[in-house]
Image: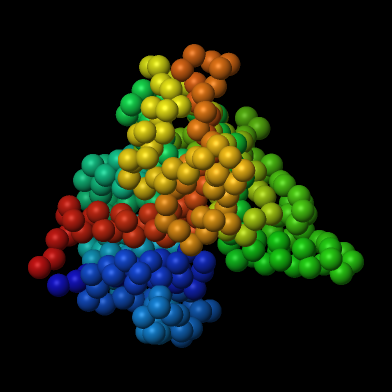
Amino acid sequence: MGYRVAVVGATGNVGREMLAILAEREFPLNEITAIASSRSTGTEIEFGDTGKLLKCKNIEHFDFAGYDIALFAAGSGPAKEYAPKAAAAGCVVIDNSSLYRMDPDVPLIVPEVNPDAIDGYSKKNIIANPNCSTAQMVVALKPLHDLATIKRCVVSTYQSVSGAGKAGMDELFEQSRAIFVGDPVEPKKFTKQIAFNVIPHIDVFMDDGSTKEEWKMVVETKKILDPKIKVNATCVRVPVFVGHSEAINLEFEKDISAAEAMDVLREAPGVMLVDKREDGGYVTPIECAGDGATYVSRVREDPTVDNGLTLWCVSDNLRKGAALNAVQIAELLGRRHLKKG
């Protein structure tokens, strides 16, 4: 027997990726339904490479009763209005927005890192998917934290424009083309020109000078991995279409060598270690696009602090950072709580 699953926000980048991954991983389905806003009602969406087309249903009139799982990829507004309705109808919501992440009654899950936390899902029937930059980082940090206990993490991100949705990808493409043909460049989605530039600003600014994206990385890492870890983040938008990169500096309570770190990373679930210490012996966003792994390269000791390490971490933000992690949560939920057949 399979599950009845709804994908909310099915016409967006992440929603489409969720459908593709459900098909790719052969998630046990009795029924799959695509849901979108009223303006996308009737739009046909491919269900991965199955050849099946799904006609989008209107979220405003949709009844979640009888559905087992709803994957929400529609943003905080629709999640606020419709996720509680789905949850009240007995459908477990896995939400990709930031709305419920810091709710103490909502588990924030990365299956390779804190699978046991999913047991608290029944308080609200909602499970939160973390921020894309947080998700890949904690997958890399978990085995190292287990080995030597991380005290402090300083991370600088290099985040692709797909993190800002289709509008972000379109803007990079259009600006790049405009520059080549000599047309004027006008920022719309981003605050400054993104083509051939980097922008140290993702999400809104907060009172302390950090951005909300940076705040998310701090509080989500603490909730998922360990509240004692001190985290400092600088989040930067770069002219890359898909794939977030992170330069991570770590300080540990216990002694740890680069060789020991690489040994545990090599065996860690969800991690792919590529560290050849030669020209091209590392992973960049181009190589990780379309892949589900979190790639780690350039692992080295930091001589400026006791028990310090530095590493490079790359992942496809639409997959592990969003859609894949949500489907993995659904798989975990099925194994532990919603067993069928």
Residue occupying image coordinates x 27% and y 44%:
115
Q: Is residue 266 visible?
A: yes
Q: Going by the image, does 54 lie left or right of 232?
A: left
**Labels in figure, total:** 0
Q: Residue furthest top?
A: 306
Q: Is residue 60 visible?
A: no
Q: Nearer the viewer, residue 257 or 111?
A: 257
Q: Nearer the viewer, residue 123 or 273?
A: 273
Q: Going by the image, does 277 lie left or right of 139?
A: right
Q: Quadrant of the C terminus?
A: bottom left
Q: Quadrant of the N terminus?
A: bottom left
Residue occupying image coordinates x 39% and y 58%:
324
Q: Can you give x and y, in whole percent of width and height, for residue 138 in the image?
A: 42, 39
Q: Going by the image, does 170 lie left or right of 255?
A: right
Can you tell which quarter of the image residue 332 is in?
bottom left
Residue occupying image coordinates x 32% and y 29%:
146
Q: Residue furthest left?
A: 341
Q: Can you give x and y, in whole percent of width and height, for residue 49 in the image?
A: 40, 78
Q: Can you give x and y, in whole percent of width and height, for residue 204 in the image?
A: 63, 45
Q: Nearer the viewer, residue 233 or 98?
A: 233
Q: Residue furthest right?
A: 182
Above or below, comparing residue 314 to residue 303 in the picture: below
